[in-house]
Image: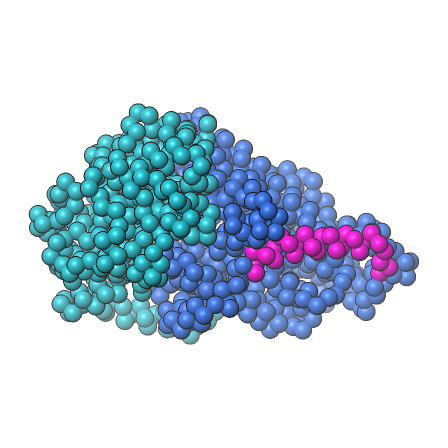
């Protein structure tokens, strides 16, 4: 927040008049709006049946798929774009199978890439909502002989609809400010985003005034969308039962089988091939050659050294916000405050990362804090940037605990640390997921670390871009594999260690 | 909180502030400082003569170097900025953060010679379209060919976010002048996409997404020397090539002014100039060096060079970018 205000202090609103009547900016806004809404809707439309299928069925490779889904959003954009190009490009697999080229450049390509990044995220968020459904309801559903469709309609939907507005907003904002994807696959400056204009103003023109105006415009648009979405969002009414017992299978029919099969194959055909293309360098001799580079392991160390503390910090901040929000929720007039607290986390997504980092840079300079503390600044900024994801992961579970046990805790006068210790077994899965997301996001970060970059901060993504920047695209692909494997290992490690063995997703 | 890592960092900070007395901080872009770039060799060679430590701070691009010192202002710890280019010179000068150098640049081999009191050039190249000679039978031989051939799939970079993109903008302007807008419109008809940076576009081209991509005349030399691959070629440009000259400058607030001055002299020395050809895949700016690798002789020679005056570029860049935007989004 302060960082953003710092940048704004360089603004002189009286000049903004001349920016407002720039027709190109408004065309940009229209296009961004369209592409972000479509990406978000498409991601969700696909994610709902897939999540339902993954929840109800157990099959070989399910866990692998879920782990892969967790890392999709940290794949560096250029690597993902190249993966998509290998599959859908002019000489890609799609062309060789169907005999004609996929219209990749334009809205089609942008949607393709955005769904690749965000649909897996959506699936995981929705699966988390499924985790809130008490097992007694499934027991009942099984006893009543409900079909999958009836169960979806009667049980699942009432949980889903609480998650969907927030999820829509999350994906919308991620796509609205998406940068490299839109430029690379957009097919020309017709497809562009506000973020490009902000980047240009900040980097090429060093026009802090224009940059502030454009970022405010972006915040205003995203806030409007957020307000509209929250209008439709049903009030948070968590279930009181947290009973977890044996799971009983539901009656399955032809229709659910078909839908499950269809949605799974769409996902497998959409998300998996680019992943295979991205991971394919693992079989090349160059991969083993790359592994022997000393700098690679240094950059792995630098990455981990930033990502772990920053993930922890994000979790601590997230937990504080969540604890505050839930303590006022369900009190008289408290709901309003709780909503605001929740949404404050989202504000971070609306402000472009580069703007946030630049603002912070100026603020710190103003306070006389030099770049000698670059390491801590990067850790801190990364933690703040991960906040929306952490909140999304831990809020529902914390609310559930509050609703169920609040009176008991109050009666017994159990607060603070002791309460957290009692709750730990119930919330550790969600905590693990929040932490894992924060660590992964920080691991994949490039913008912040590049702005503050100095000795000792050469992270894995930076190493990758150095390679690609010196013509070594193939070797860059190998480093991307290392990055993804590192993400997978950390994700698995964190969910197992912190989340315990019950951590299914 | 991990106290141990804090202690380690604190110790490292202490150590670095002691060492700072004899450290030269050079801000540069990432691929220059990387282990395959010219950075490491230049570091060892300079350290051998200066009894000091060279510390490269790698930023994401040449624009990144400038915006970093703009953000830091007078408090910057940078001594030397290495890796600005021709088109950033004007805005870099306007920051008032640079100091004049006292390097003798009379022997510098750039088109039209070199005389600038703030900047010393360290390497040069020419923007060009690269093609795969095994796939493209009739390659373009001029910029007009690239613009007008509607069957040619083109990838170039965004002039708002990348150096080669800006280079193409100026190249088009110097060839087409008043007709640039129409030429852009014509080019946009067969443009595959316009990418954010050089590497996005170039890697898309390597994956076969386009017939030609905007890069440098020296790019094929990398493929020949490092990969033994001879199929990539730079297209000729009968109108003339547009140059890219990379420059270095000294900071006014340089903590280590004497070392900075010594380094500025070193830039034109053979020890530095010998590294740029196969380190940065660009041409050196001096004659006093070892012959270039064989591969460089196969590259198109820039017999004719187009340039626009720096003041005009600085003044009209924004207008030309808008013209490009207008023409390509029609």
Residue A273 among those drawn in magenta: yes
Q: Colour of chain B?
A: cyan
Q: Quadrant of residue A399?
A: bottom right
- Which hue is chain A drawn in? blue
Q: Is residue A387 above or below residue A169?
A: below
Q: Residue at x 50, y 31 (%)?
A: A27
Q: Nearer the viewer, residue A293 or B177?
A: B177
Determine if the magenta segment contains residue A284: no
Q: Is A135 situated above or below A36?
A: below
Residue A160, given in percent of the width and then of the height, sits at 73, 51
**Which residue is at the front of the view, A311 or A43?**
A43
Asked if residue B72 can be seen in this view, the reply is: no
Q: Position of residue A201 (x, y in %)?
A: 38, 39
Magenta span: A250-276
Residue at 26% from the left image edge and 37% from the top image edge: B238
Q: Position of residue A423 (x, y in %)?
A: 68, 68
> Which residue sits at x=54%, y=59%?
A277
């Amino acid at each position: 927040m302060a960082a953003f205000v710092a940048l704004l202090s360089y603004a002189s609103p009286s000049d903004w008049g001349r920016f407002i009547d720039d027709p190109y900016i408004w065309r940009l806004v229209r296009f961004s709006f369209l592409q972000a809404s479509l990406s978000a809707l498409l991601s969700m439309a696909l994610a709902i049946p897939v999540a339902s299928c993954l929840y109800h069925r157990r099959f070989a490779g399910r866990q692998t798929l879920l782990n892969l889904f967790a890392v999709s959003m940290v794949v560096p954009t250029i690597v993902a774009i190249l993966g998509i190009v290998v599959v859908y490009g002019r000489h890609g697999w799609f062309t060789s199978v169907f005999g004609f080229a996929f219209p990749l450049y334009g809205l089609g390509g942008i949607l393709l890439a955005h769904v690749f990044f965000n649909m897996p995220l959506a699936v995981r968020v929705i699966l988390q909502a499924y985790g809130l459904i008490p097992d007694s309801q499934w027991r009942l559903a099984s006893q009543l002989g409900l079909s999958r469709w009836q169960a979806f309609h009667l049980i699942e939907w009432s949980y889903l609809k609480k998650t969907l507005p927030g999820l829509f907003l999350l994906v919308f904002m991620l796509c609205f400010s998406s940068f490299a994807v839109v430029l690379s696959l957009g097919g020309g400056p017709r497809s562009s985003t506000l973020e490009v204009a902000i980047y240009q103003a900040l980097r090429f023109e060093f026009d802090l005034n224009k940059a502030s105006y454009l970022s405010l415009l972006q915040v205003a648009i995203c806030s409007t969308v957020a307000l509209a979405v929250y209008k439709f969002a049903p009030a948070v009414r968590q279930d009181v039962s947290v009973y977890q017992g044996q799971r009983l299978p539901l009656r399955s029919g032809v229709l659910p089988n078909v839908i499950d099969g269809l949605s799974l194959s769409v996902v497998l055909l959409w998300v998996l091939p680019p992943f295979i293309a991205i991971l394919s360098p693992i079989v090349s001799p160059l991969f083993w050659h790359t592994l022997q580079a000393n700098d690679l392991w240094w950059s792995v160390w630098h990455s981990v050294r930033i990502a772990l503390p920053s993930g922890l910090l994000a979790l601590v901040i997230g937990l504080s916000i969540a604890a505050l929000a839930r303590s006022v929720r369900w009190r008289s007039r408290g709901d309003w405050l709780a909503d605001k607290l929740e949404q404050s986390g989202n504000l971070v997504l609306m402000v472009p990362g580069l703007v946030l980092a630049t603002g912070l840079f100026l603020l710190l300079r103003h306070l006389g804090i030099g770049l000698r503390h670059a390491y801590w600044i990067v850790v801190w900024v990364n933690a703040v940037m991960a906040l929306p994801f952490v909140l999304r992961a831990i809020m529902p579970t914390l609310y559930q605990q509050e609703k169920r046990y609040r009176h008991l805790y109050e009666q017994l006068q159990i607060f603070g640390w002791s309460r957290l210790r009692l709750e730990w077994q119930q919330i550790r899965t969600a905590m693990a997921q929040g932490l894992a997301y924060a660590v992964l996001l920080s691991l994949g970060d490039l913008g912040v670390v590049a702005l503050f970059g100095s000795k000792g901060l050469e992270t894995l993504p930076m190493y990758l871009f150095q390679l690609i920047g010196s013509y070594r695209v193939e070797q860059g692909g190998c480093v991307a594999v290392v990055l993804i494997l590192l993400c997978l290992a950390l994700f698995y490690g964190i969910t197992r260690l912190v989340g315990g063995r019950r951590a299914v997703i | 909180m991990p106290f141990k890592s804090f202690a380690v960092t604190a110790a490292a900070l202490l150590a670095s502030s002691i060492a700072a007395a004899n450290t030269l901080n050079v801000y540069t872009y990432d691929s220059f400082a990387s282990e395959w770039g010219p950075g490491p060799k230049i570091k060892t060679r300079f350290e051998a003569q200066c009894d000091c430590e060279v510390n490269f701070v790698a930023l994401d691009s040449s624009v990144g170097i400038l915006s970093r010192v703009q953000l830091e202002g007078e408090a910057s710890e940078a001594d030397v900025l290495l890796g600005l280019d021709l088109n950033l010179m004007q805005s870099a000068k306007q920051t008032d953060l640079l100091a004049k150098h006292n390097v003798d640049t009379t022997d510098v081999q750039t088109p039209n010679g070199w005389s600038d009191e703030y900047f010393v050039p360290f390497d040069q190249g020419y923007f060009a379209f690269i093609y795969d000679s095994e796939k493209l039978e009739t390659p373009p031989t001029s910029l007009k060919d690239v613009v007008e051939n509607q069957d040619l799939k083109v990838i170039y970079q965004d002039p708002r976010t990348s150096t080669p993109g800006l280079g193409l903008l100026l190249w088009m302007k110097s060839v087409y002048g008043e007709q640039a807008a129409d030429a852009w419109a014509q080019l946009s008809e067969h443009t595959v996409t316009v990418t954010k940076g050089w590497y996005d576009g170039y890697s898309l081209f390597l994956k076969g997404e386009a017939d030609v991509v905007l890069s440098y005349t020296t790019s094929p030399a990398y493929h020949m020397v490092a990969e033994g691959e001879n199929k990539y070629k730079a297209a000729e440009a009968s109108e003339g090539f547009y140059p890219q000259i990379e420059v270095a400058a000294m900071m006014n607030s340089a903590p280590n002014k004497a070392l900075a001055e010594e380094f500025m002299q070193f830039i034109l020395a053979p020890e530095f100039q010998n590294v740029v050809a196969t380190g940065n895949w660009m041409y050196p700016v001096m004659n006093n060096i070892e012959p270039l690798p064989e591969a460089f002789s196969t590259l198109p020679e820039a017999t004719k060079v187009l340039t626009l005056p720096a003041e005009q570029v600085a003044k009209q860049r924004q207008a030309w970018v808008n013209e490009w935007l207008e023409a390509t989004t029609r």
